[in-house]
Image: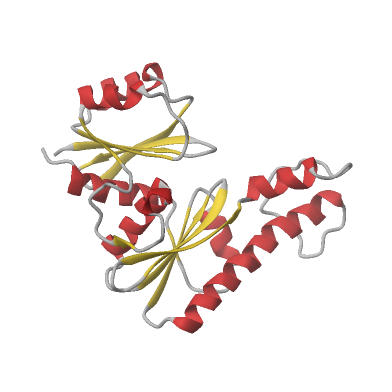
Amino acid sequence: MPVTLCLDFGNTRLKYVVFHGDTIFTSGVLQDHSKQDLEPILKEFGPDLSILSSVVDHDNGLEDFLATRSRFHRLSHETRLPFKVTVGKPEEVGADRLALAAAAVTFFPRKHNLVIGLGSAITYNFINQDHEFLGGGISPGMEMRFRSLHEYTAKLPLIKKDWILPLTGYDTRTNILSGVILGMVAEIDGIINSYAVRYDNFNVVLTGGDCTYFARHLKNRIFADPDFLFKGLYALSETNNHL
């Protein structure tokens, strides 16, 4: 049974998932993108295949290092994809968004899919039932909203997320929690509603580390899967890495 190492280098965290066959075996977070940090994972799991989605400037030698230890693929607009990218500049589409689109057409084929990724930014990724990635939208993520309120005002504090929050805040902290988190919920529900009016045979997937918490507040019916991006990476590795 082949072992596949899937790496997602985002703006906030450097994450990895190890697949045994098509099943997730383990996952974790890297401290940095150095060969030294990756070596223990390669030694422990000995991946046959590896694939990298990166939206940051990572160590240039890392890709060559992975290629010497596994059959490696770097996800980009030149990757063989199970969908068409019909935007003006395909090379500008983030690798993370390509992985989400790949998961959508793999698990929900021939549907209009809206995949919402919760990360440093919120990405709205629309793939139609003809398997065409049409784009979507990008807005600030939760931590970015908390930080901007602190950094662009004189007195508002920087707070941390808390899922126990009131609709009507009763002090500065709970006002910020309500405004940011419930504001995001309203935004997400509103975007979903706008797509639902236009498209039948419509499916929504919410993903990212906080997706299960947001799913509880949303009025719309969705699929919540925190590992959806990695499942897309695995599918793309199967297409682009051949043993």
Judging from the image, the colouring scheme is secondary structure
Quarter of the image where one finds residue 103? bottom left
In this view, 217 is above or below 161: below
Q: Tell me residue 93's x, y (percent).
A: 42, 51
Left-right relation of 148 to 140:
right
Q: Which residue is at 54% across, 77% downward? A: 194
Q: Which residue is at 40% across, 83% downward? A: 200
Q: Which residue is at 80% across, 44% downward? A: 152
Q: Tell me residue 197's x, y (percent).
A: 50, 83
Of 208 and 137, the residue lying toward us: 137
Q: How many marks?
A: 0
Quadrant including the N terminus: top left
Quarter of the image where one finds residue 51? top left
In this view, 210 is above or below 224: above
In this view, 60 is above or below 49: above
Left-right relation of 98 to 120:
left
Q: Tell me residue 184's x, y (percent).
A: 64, 61
